[in-house]
Each structure stands twice: as C-alpha cells, then as structure tokens.
Amino acid sequence: MNALQNKNIVLGVCGGIAAYKSPDLVRRLAEAGANVQVVMTGHAREFVSPLTFQAVSGRAARDTLFDEAAEAAMGHIELARWADLILIAPATANTIARITHGLADDLLTTLCLATRAPLAVAPAMNQVMWSNPATQANIALLSQRGVSVLGPGCGDQACGETGAGRMLEPLVLREQVAALLDDTAQSLAGKSVLITAGPTREAIDPVRYISNHSSGKMGFAIAAAAAKAGARVTLIAGPTTIAPPAGCQVVAVESAAQMHQAVMEQAAQHAVFISVAAVADFRLKEVREQKMKKSADEITLTLIKNPDILADVAALQNGRPFCVGFAAETHDLENYAADKLARKNLDMICANLVQSGGDSVFNSDDNALEIFLRDGGRISLPSASKTRIAHTLVDLIAERLG
Ligand code: CTP
C-alpha cells in the first residue's frame, strides 16, 4: 500500500447512487497515506453532502470553477498540477461522455483537461446505459488514450436490474489505484506479452451459440499488470462485458477458430504467451445457416474438437514464447494440472478449483491459484483480488524469464 503514501489524489464524484460509497473510498485512500481532494459535480450534491466529504478528507469539497475563496487558496490549474492522479468514482455515463469529448463545463471536467496526471474512471450506472454503444465507444476511446477504466462490477443494481454497471467496492478501487501509482515495478520492460482472455462462442445457428461462464476478468487483470510492468501487451479477447485495460492492444474475436488464427499470426513475435481464455474445446460440425426450428422433441448436435491454441503455440519450432497455461478443475487439481503442464509442453500452469456453477472463479473479483512449474516447483497464491494475483503472477513470470 506504500504506493499511496503522500500521493495527491483528486477524487471526482458524480451524481449517481454509488456516490454513497465515495466517502468510504476517501477514508480508505486517506488510511493508506494519500491526500484526497474531493471535486463534486453539481448532481453529486443531490446524493452526498459536501460536508460529509470535508469530514472524511479534512479538505473542503470543491464543486465549482467560480468559488473565489477556493480559487484564491488553490486555483483550478494549480489543483490540476497538484494531482498525482485523478480518480472519478463513481463516473456516470454523462461525465464519461463529457471527458471523452473534451468538455470543460464544470470544475471536474476542466481539471481532467488541464492535468498531466493519469486519469482513472470507475463507471457506475444502469446496465443498459453501460452496454449502450455510445457509452462503450466512449470507454474504448478513453482506454485507447491511456485512461484506466476500473470496473464496473457485475451484480444487483440499485434500479432493481442485474448486470454490469456497479461501481467497484472502495477496497478494490484502493488496490487498483495503488497498482496504478506503483512506479517501482517494471519487471517486464522491453518484453512483449501475448494474452488470451474471456470465453469463446461457438455458433449453432445465426441466433444461438455454445459458450461458458468466463468473464475475462483474470486475463484482463494480467494484461493490465503486464502493461504496468513495462511490457508491450497484445490481448486477444473473446466476448466480454468488461472494459479493456489501458495501454494494451486489444484484438476482439468470437470463436475458438478466430482466436487460434489471431494467436498463431503473432505468437512467435512475443516473449511470453499467457493463455487465460476459456476456449471451447468443441465446435459444431455444421453451423446451420438458418435458425433451427423446434419441430423435433429431441435433437442431436455433432461437435468436433477445436484446435488447442496453447499446445500449438508451445509446439512452435521457431520463436516459441515462454508458455503459461491456466487450468480450471473441479477435483484432483494437482494431478490434472501436472498432466496438462507435461502434455502441452508448458513452462508454467496456474490451476484453480471451480465450485459447482462456476461463478466462484469466473465472475468473482477474487481468485486463488496453485502454480506448477516445468522444473517441478510449486507456488501457492492464496485468495486475493484478481488485480493482486495478476501482479504477483507477472512478477513470477518476469523472474523466470531472467
Ligand atoms: N486452451 C487453449 N485452446 C483450447 C483449449 C484450451 O488454448 N482449445 C488453453 C486454455 O487457455 C488454458 C488451458 O489450455 O490455458 C486449459 O487446458 P484444457 O486442457 O483445455 O483445460 P480444460 O478445457 O479444462 O480441459 P479438460 O477438459 O481436459 O480438463
């Protein structure tokens, strides 16, 4: 948590119900040694009082460009220079749109334009607003510009719906912010890393497919950690609802065949290949061109095996990268993981236990890994956030690369 000691953080708070969590976030950041200046949008005042933020941060919350007393104490340009990081939590769809388009119509958006500090946003909104193409395009653009998009999480929403759009919890945000501000770890500087993440979709007909519970969170966290450690990262991602990590080149694919092609085109140009994707092992022998009708009481779908992407990369004769696999097992973890390590000719395999339903690993923000190495070594990473696990894993890989 030392990365936060004496760091100056401008915390932007927008008008969304998740703003009730922001005073706790201020406390958590302050506990870790950060100096926090809260800047509220006009709508944020409808949810939390400025006095609450003053009490937890020790600084009067600011919300306007035109406050003479506040400007005399620290003008907005000075405040933009003071910040080591601007974190907007919660970030509403409206403020995300405003900063994407460079508006400066209140103090917060003006600071975003006027700062050289890194910018991070923690989106919080109704799931339909989050998945709206306008919001998704804005997020993609911000991400390309190097803005860190933290979350959103998935689950029950204040509006009664369920889906992606919840602000991450304050402790998770604190950890992610600490990782962003940690400039000590550049263990993969100059190296290039290729990562697959998320599920694949195998079409049955034009409207149906076979897929799995993978959320992409673990792979995206590893991509972010590798980029943070100085690597050039290419992320080949199956369909997910989470925002792509900043600073990575992202290639979106759907099926295992597309993922296989995208990986094989690039693998030999990378020093490391981390295969986190939950690739469907089988695809339909014949994909129907037209929607199947439910006329029969029973149907049989014939599946054929997909290529094993990881095994194909590990078998490369020229330019074989350091190969890291993942194994999700419901039982007998050690034997199955060791078998996959040998059978696929890997350098490292990260195994986790999946409980029934799969949600405990796939959708969770936490994970625990048992890592098995080619030389017989074994390392346990006990349950921690996927961000923390990702940083530890990246460091372990960097050590082994030498
Ligand atoms: N993998 C891959 N291509 C596939 C299948 C899996 O690259 N077609 C990779 C995954 O990304 C992961 C590892 O291989 O790194 C998982 O190994 P796998 O043997 O496929 O695991 P399971 O599907 O769980 O296999 P099994 O059914 O044998 O347990």
Image (cartoon, rainbow, N blue to C red):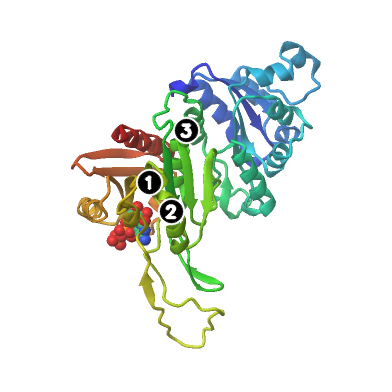
Q: Which residue is mark 1?
A: 273
Q: Nearer the viewer, residue 159 or 39?
A: 39
Residue visible at 73% across and 20% down in the picture? 76
Residues at discs 1 and 2 in contact (Cβ within 8 Å): yes
Circle 2 Cα neighbour tier, 10 Å, few/some/many (<14 / 14–19 / ≥20):
many
Marks 2 and 3, how far apart at CA? 22 Å
Circle 1 Cα neighbour tier, 10 Å, few/some/many (<14 / 14–19 / ≥20):
many
Q: Position of residue 306 (x, y in %)?
A: 38, 66
Q: Which numbered disc flags the more N-terminal residue, 1 or 2?
A: 2
Quadrant including the N terminus: top left
Mark 1 or 3, closer to the camera: 1
Q: Position of residue 20 (x, y in %)?
A: 61, 35
Residues at discs 1 and 3 in contact (Cβ within 8 Å): no
Q: Which residue is mark 3?
A: 228
Residue visible at 64% across and 43% down in the picture? 141
Kind of residue at badge 2: Val
